[in-house]
Image (cartoon, rainbow, N blue to C red):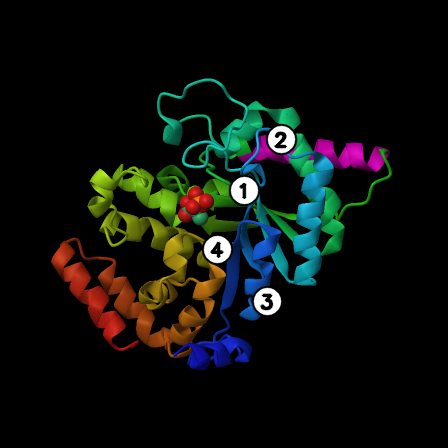
Amino acid sequence: SRTRLARLKDAPTVTLDGTPIELLCNIETPRDLDLVHRVNADGIGLYRTEFLFLDRLDRPSEDEQYEAYRDVLKSMKGKPVTIRTFDLGGDKDFAPNTTRVQPNPALGLRAIRYCLAEPTFFLTQLRALLRASVHGTLKILLPMVAHAHEIDQTLQLIARAKEQLQREGKKFAEDVELGAMVEIPAAALTPGIFLKRAHFLSIGTNDLIQYTLAIDRQDDAVADLYDPLHPAVLRLIAGTIQFGVKNGLPVSLCGELAGHPEYTWLFLGMGLRQFSMHPERVLSVKQRLLRADLADLAPKVQRLLKLDEPARLREAFEKLNAAAT
Ligand code: PEP
Ligand code: MG
């Protein structure tokens, strides 16, 4: 029940065998913070800043952005806050000042590609982020990365933003971590490109499923083919998590699946230790993980990942969960 769930809020977030797990929140505006505090989350795993563009035609200024980012960092009092740079275009087309009709928005100039094509615009966001960084623990997350040079170019822009701020006598934290979303199959298949460039990864299953299965996430006509349990999807997710474990690169998962308790044990068994989800989902996921025995789950999930036949895979998934409920 809801009250029993609410009581979980202050329980330590550890599995049955004592492994600590981080439960983080996805937010779209500083107004979502009330909910985040209500569940006592470990931090913000995904702040979708493109919502600063909602219901307006002009672009948010550097100061306006700075204030929004600062408010979130201050409110979280030192807990990690992962702010994603603008993921404009594709399904989030809030008048990003492009009049060009894109033949295929999901495959077009969106997210990090759009930002790198408009470096002045991107620099404004990076400056605002750096200025806000003194108010807490900021991590910057780049959406839709597929190429190493996208991170390299961003690092150059961050260096330029720091030079400018220094010259202007404005403060910023030196050690802000940079991470990449893994939401394009190419990124999931070549995580090595991130080793020397990123401090952390975050798996975006919403887009990863869309691009792996070639299913438009917004098209109802193919919605029944949008299958998170397709073995190709599971292997890309598991491969990314296991790469992170082997190489000491922290990996979080911030797609909608992170907030579905039926997937909690599956991801724990893959080795995932950080989940980021809508604040309303945190306590249901927490309830599941408190009862998870990782030594028992890991080999079961390894066997599940070898299955190709959908019926057998679904059966293994249900069996895994039968013990969880
Ligand atoms: C994702 O793609 O899974 C994700 C978290 O980002 P968004 O839903 O904002 O595209
Ligand atoms: Mg995405």
Q: Which residue is mark 1?
A: 51
Q: Earlier in the sequence, mark 2 or mark 4?
A: 2
- Circle nearer the viewer, 3 or 4: 3
Is 119 in front, or is 174? 119
Q: Earlier in the sequence, mark 3 or mark 4?
A: 3
Is 210 in front, or is 245? 210
Q: Earlier in the sequence, mark 1 or mark 3?
A: 3
Query: Which residue is at the far top?
Result: 100
Q: Which residue is mark 3?
A: 37
Q: CA distance from mark 1 to mark 3?
A: 20 Å
* Residue pictured at 51% horizontal, 72% vertical: 20
Q: Residue 201: in sight, yes or no?
A: yes
Rendering coords of residue 41 (x, y %): 55, 67
**Image marks 2 and 4: residues in contact by CB distance under 8 Å:** no
Rendering coords of residue 56 (x, y %): 57, 33
In the rendered view, would you say 73 is above or below 100?
below
Q: CA distance from mark 2 to mark 4?
A: 32 Å
**Image marks 3 and 4: residues in contact by CB distance under 8 Å:** no
| Circle 1 crowding by C-alpha within 10 Å: few under 14, some 14–19, many from 20 | some
Q: Which residue is mark 4?
A: 251
| Circle 3 crowding by C-alpha within 10 Å: few under 14, some 14–19, many from 20 | some
- Identify the disc placed on residue 59: 2
User: Is residue 163 located in the magenta-colored stretch of the structure?
Assistant: yes
